[in-house]
Amino acid sequence: MNKKTKVFIPILVVVIVLLVVGLFLNSFVEKKAISLLNEQLPELKFEDLEVRVFKNEAELTKIDLNRGEVNIQSELLKVSGLNYWKFLTKKDIDLNHIEINDPKVVYQAKSSGKKSLTKTNSASKSSSNSEKLTKKISVKEIVLNHAKFTLLDSTSAEKIRVKNFDFQLFALKIDSSSVSKKIPFHFKDFALKADSVFLKVDERHVMNVAAIEIHEKKSSLKGLKLGSIYSKSEFQEHTPIEKDRYNLLVDSIAIEHQDFGFKSDSLKYRASRFSIHHADFEIYRDKTQPDDNTVKPMYSEMLRKLPFLLKIDTLNVDNARIVYEERIKAGRSSGKVIFAKVQGEISNLTNFSDSTEFPTTRIIAEADFMDQAALQLNWAFKVNNPSDWFSVSGNMGTLSAQNMNTFLTPGMNVKAKGDITSMIFNFSGNRNVATGGLNIAYKDFKIEVLKNDGTEKSGFLTTIANIFVKHNGESGENVNKGLEIERDKTKSFWNYLWSCIKKGALKTFT
């Protein structure tokens, strides 16, 4: 036997022994892992589990997990970095990495009757699982690549669809104490990137977002589009009463220093800054349809009654455009109000306080009203005030009658000539009544009353109207002081503010 043979034989024996031990260990760990998965996650189905002990990795193929209302399917799941000692001695799962490629996640809501039963069963299962879960699960990183998500209602119609997203979760820990909490696990950080997001807002509107990026402390959205699935002429056929039709485009939204959590039993969300860049918001309402006579809450009440806790320190709106269009009479063009180049800031947008003093919510905004008049608005209210107290003041620069006619003619059947050179207003009140005053300066102001067709002037009515209208003047600081305006509770806050300004203006001109 030569020297080469003497060296080769021991090496071959070692390799064979290692292979045999490896095969034995692979088989042993596979059986242990399958047993543990069946015990801890009986809803998980898979075709095959392959363990490679020396590489410290494993793969699950053709996964199908049904748990409650959620179904997850994936061709391949990879795990690596298993702590064998913890697994073999304590059955604890301690992993470095879990990777799921091309998973499809579907959540289907049950009907109301079945849902309560499902919730009861889920609750009992959760309670049962928390009692059974005596082992610990920890994973340094979980990765989902090229995932898809769909949320269906009880009729299998899509409510949310995410065409593609990547997700990472870091330092996941689950134990017997965590599973009994609102969030049944602990983690250090997460990252989500998604594109082509679809959301059904209601029966008449849908929203699409081109891209979303969410981290634990900050988030961003790009290319947001909210619009109706019906045209203006079709919209009202799909609601028995008048409703607003929305069309909103937003270039981007940025959120800074956000935090998710719970306070007592309520979900809590807070952020230091919420910035909306380059928004275009169009609202259309057909007033020829039956009125919606339900009571409209004030904004303070809406925030107060949110089903979760909200706190945004500062919300900024940068370079927005808002158009409100109203069809008032059949066969007439609709009236239109435009706010261009809107810049605004809302501070203390919240429905809870961490201190004894509840903060005042304040809105400061400026815009070009009807693309012409510089308009400034200062508005404040307290969410915790049960009477819905508010204070609103502002001023407006020169506005020509030609620009006013786009909403005066369709709504009031009149045309105006001349200019409003300035307006200052200041009102305060609650959900029932407001008081305050308004100061207007104007020149060469005249009124033309139109015939019913809205195209020709009625000479007689125009003559009568201009007898009572002052053509030049300034109302003065005290002329409108102490006005009292009762709120129509079936209308919005903006109708309330418009009623205050309209009453002051009519008193000034006549």
Image (tube, rainbow, N blue to C red):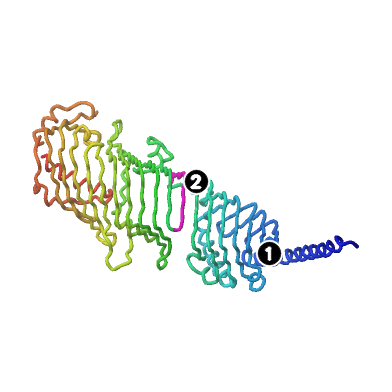
Comparing 163 with 220, the one in front is 220
Q: CA distance from mark 1 to mark 2?
A: 36 Å
Residue 204, visible in the rendered structure: no
Label 2: which secondary element:
strand
Secondary structure under tag 1 reads helix
| Residue that appears at 76% across and 66% down | 21
Q: Is residue 215 magenta?
A: yes
Q: Pick whichever, 75 or 293, lies toward us.
A: 75
- Look at the image and tell me whether residue 365 can be seen: yes
Which residue is drawn at the image coordinates 52% and 72% (left, top)?
177
- Count of numbered circles in the view: 2
| Rendered residue at 45%/45% (across/down) | 209
**Kind of residue sitting beneath label 2:** Asp
Task: Tell me the tag on residue 195.
Answer: 2
Give the left or right position of residue 41, taking residue 199 as reference.
right
Q: Is residue 145 above or below residue 89?
A: above
The percent coordinates of residue 432 (x first, y second) are 22, 55
Query: Which mark sits nearer the N-terminus, 1 or 2?
Result: 1
Identify residue for label 1.
34
Q: Nearer the viewer, mark 1 or mark 2?
A: 2
> Where in the figure is residue 215, as x and y percent of width and height?
46, 55
Which residue, as the protein is rendered here, is positioned at the far right? 1
Is residue 437 found inside the magenta-colored segment of the image? no
Q: Is residue 28 left or right of residue 143?
A: right
Amino acid under disc 1: Ile
Decide: few, some or many residues near mark 1? Use Cα within 10 Å; few <14, some 14-19, many ≥20. few
- Which residue in the rendered view is the most extreme toward the front? 3
Q: Position of residue 80 (x, y in %)?
A: 63, 60
Range drawn in magenta: 202-216
